[in-house]
Image: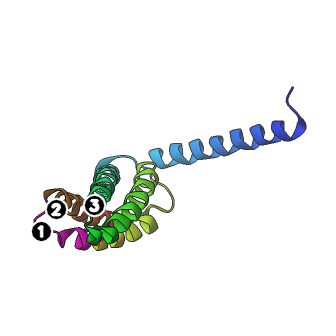
Amino acid sequence: MIGRREFGVVGMSAAALGAMQAVGVAQEKAGHDHGEHGSMFDDCAKACNDCQRACDGCVRHCAIEMSKGNKEHLKTLSSCSDCAAVCATAAQIVARHGYFAKGICESCADICGKCAKECEQFSDDKHMQECAKECRKCEKACREMVKHA
């Protein structure tokens, strides 16, 4: 049996979903989901998602390197972990054309730039260079999106 509180939560959730759908419909009618602007959001969300996966892989790589005694990987393990978390959040917000897309992309671009710089220090490590490359792509996509948002 659903109590009064649970019924209220369900009702509020339904109202919130309805409002979000109404905003989406209004944006679609206004043309916000079409053309170059919509494509820019999609490209940015994809770059963020790709970067998140690369950084998550790099975290594992750095952990393995640290287990071998390569303590210099501690900083990149931390920076890649944080970068992956920010990129995952940015991908979600940007994919839904969220209200805070511009702000999260500004932060994401800065963080990706710093993460790439850390990974680029390992010029002889193919895995680290691949991570840096994805970070630079994400940084560029986020900066482009911010310009047009």
Q: Residues within 10 Å of mark 3 (few under 14, many from 20)?
A: many
Q: Label 3 sits on what residue type? A: Cys
Q: Secondary structure at mark 2?
A: helix
Q: CA distance from mark 3 to mark 2?
A: 14 Å
Q: Is residue 34 left or right of residue 16?
A: left
Alpha carbons under labels 1 and 2: distance apart = 7 Å
- Left/right placement of residue 5 relative to residue 30 reads right
Say which amino acid is labelled 1. Ser
Q: Looking at the image, is mark 3 or mark 2 earlier in the sequence? A: 2
- Dot placed on the residue nearer the N-terminal end, 1 or 3: 1
| Mark before the other along the chain sequence, 1 or 2 | 1
Identify the residue position indicated by label 1 in the image: 123
Q: Residue furthest top?
A: 1
Residue drawn at the location 49% of the way across and 55% of the way down: 98
Say what secondary structure mark 1 lies in: loop
Residue 4 visible to the viewer: yes
Q: Which residue is mark 2?
A: 129
Residue 120 in the magenta stretch? The answer is yes
State how the image is colored: rainbow
Which residue does the image show at 57% across and 42% down from the upper left?
Answer: 21
Spot occupied by residue 148 in the image (x, y as percentages of width and height):
33, 65
Residue 110, picture quadrant:
bottom left
Q: Which mark is residue 138?
A: 3
Magenta-highlighted residues:
115-125
Q: Quadrant of residue 58?
A: bottom left
Left or right of 71 on screen, residue 12: right
Residue contact at pointers 1 and 2, CB within 8 angstroms: yes
